[in-house]
């Protein structure tokens, strides 16, 4: 068996605002390796990032005696995307959709878990990718035996989170990029206060513009907002009694980008992996120290076949 490359010539990679560099790397590297030139259509919201990354890549190419024009870029919005798709000179377009508010991710903690491990992971996953990625956590399922202990630790940790300029060392939570995102945050807080109980946060901060507080909400699994999706630091917390209950309520959403479990029971992990994998779930992890990271290539199960052919 061997691999045969399928170079197209020039392809276009379209990335959204959130995680724009990660989405670029996930989609462009395979195209470059298999002999294609890449044009990157960066997001209009952050053009300087596209310029900076393009200069870095051009420098690497030129140091290796390759012309920098192998990788070029420009920025634009939906009208430019339409023009790219209609252009018959472009044989392949690789894109990552801007759908971060349609996903609903969860963390489940069993009674035997090392509590401090998921606590830090929960905080990092709630604030670490706020307004930036699909892996922002929405729902937290805690066994009744550890429920109060975990919540107490989360309250303390949320109270110590440093909010401010993301370019400054030590900042853990920066500004929400879009005004519409902050408006969505305030709407969700209002609905949460009507259907549940806000345990920490729940407002904007002393800072101006689009800063918000990391928020924990105790709410019923039957509330309508539980099935929603968002990219700001709000996590809904639920108490469960049985493992079967946790699985059922966890799976009661349409889509999830990431799902995590914390336990030392191998047989439970095995059951959980089989159950969660049967649903529309992108990444599944067990006992991961920091959840706000991605291990997958982000290429999908079949997209690599656009660039290579397996020969027997």
Image (cartoon, grey):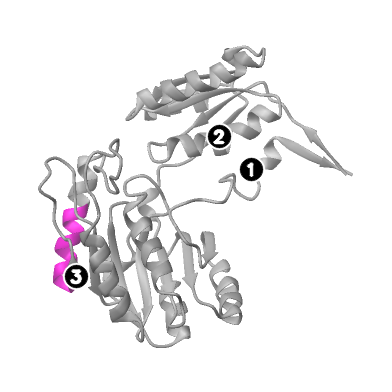
Mark 2–mark 1 contact, CB under 8 Å?
A: yes
Mark 3–mark 2 contact, CB under 8 Å?
A: no
Q: Is residue 253 visible?
A: no
Q: Residue at x 60, y 48 (%)?
A: 300
Q: Residue at x 38, y 74 (%)?
A: 141
Looking at the rendered structure, the secondary structure element under dot 1 is: helix
| Among the two numbered marks 3 and 1 on one chain, the one whose residue lies closer to the N terminus | 3
Rounded to the nearest angstrom, the CA distance separating label 3 from label 1 is: 43 Å
Residue 179 in picture, x, y percent from top left: 20, 41
Q: Nearer the viewer, residue 158 or 21?
A: 158
Q: Residue at x 41, y 36 (%)?
A: 16
The residue wearing badge 2 is 94
Residue 159 in picture, x, y percent from top left: 20, 61
* In the image: residue 83, left or right of residue 221: right
* In the image: residue 139, left or right of residue 213: right
Looking at the rendered structure, the secondary structure element under dot 2 is: strand
Q: Name the image quarter holding the N terminus.
A: top right
Residue neighbourhood size for the residue with mark 1, other residues' Cα within 10 Å, grouped as few (<14), some (14–19), many (≥20): few
Residue 76 in picture, x, y percent from top left: 38, 24
Number of disc labels = 3
In the rendering, which numbered label is found on residue 226?
none
Q: Residue at x 47, y 51 (%)?
A: 293
- The magenta span reads 185-196
Q: Nearer the viewer, residue 249 or 197?
A: 197
The residue wearing badge 3 is 199
The residue wearing badge 1 is 303
* In the image: residue 68, left or right of residue 164: right
| Among the two numbered marks 3 and 2 on one chain, the one whose residue lies closer to the N terminus | 2
* In the image: residue 138, left or right of residue 255: left
């Amino acid at each position: 068996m061997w691999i045969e490359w399928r170079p197209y010539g020039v392809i276009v990679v379209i990335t959204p605002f959130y995680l724009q560099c990660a989405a670029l790397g996930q989609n462009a590297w395979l195209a470059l390796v298999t002999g294609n030139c890449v044009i990157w259509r960066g997001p209009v919201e952050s053009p300087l990032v596209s310029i900076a990354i393009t200069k870095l890549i051009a420098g690497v190419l030129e140091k290796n005696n390759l012309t920098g024009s192998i990788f070029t870029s420009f920025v634009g919005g939906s009208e430019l995307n339409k023009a790219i798709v209609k252009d018959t000179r472009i044989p392949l377009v690789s894109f990552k959709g801007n759908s971060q508010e349609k996903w609903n991710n969860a963390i489940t903690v069993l009674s035997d878990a090392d509590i401090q491990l998921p606590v830090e992971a929960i905080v990092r996953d709630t604030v670490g990718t706020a307004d930036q990625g699909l892996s922002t956590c929405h729902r937290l399922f805690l066994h009744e035996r550890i429920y109060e202990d975990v919540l107490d630790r989360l309250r303390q940790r949320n109270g110590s989170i440093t909010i401010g300029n993301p370019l400054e060392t030590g900042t853990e939570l920066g500004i929400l990029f879009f005004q519409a995102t902050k408006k969505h945050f305030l709407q969700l807080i209002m609905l949460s206060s009507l259907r549940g109980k806000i345990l920490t946060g729940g407002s904007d901060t002393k800072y101006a513009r689009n800063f918000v507080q990391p928020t924990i909400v105790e709410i019923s699994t039957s509330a309508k907002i539980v099935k929603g999706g968002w990219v700001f630091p709000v996590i809904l917390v639920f108490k469960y009694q049985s493992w079967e209950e946790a699985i059922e309520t966890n799976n009661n959403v349409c889509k999830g980008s990431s799902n995590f479990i914390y336990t030392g029971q191998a047989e439970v992990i095995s059951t959980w992996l089989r159950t969660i994998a049967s649903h529309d779930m992108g990444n599944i992890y067990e006992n991961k120290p920091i959840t706000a990271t991605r291990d997958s290539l982000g290429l999908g199960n079949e997209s690599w076949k656009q660039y290579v052919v397996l020969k027997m």
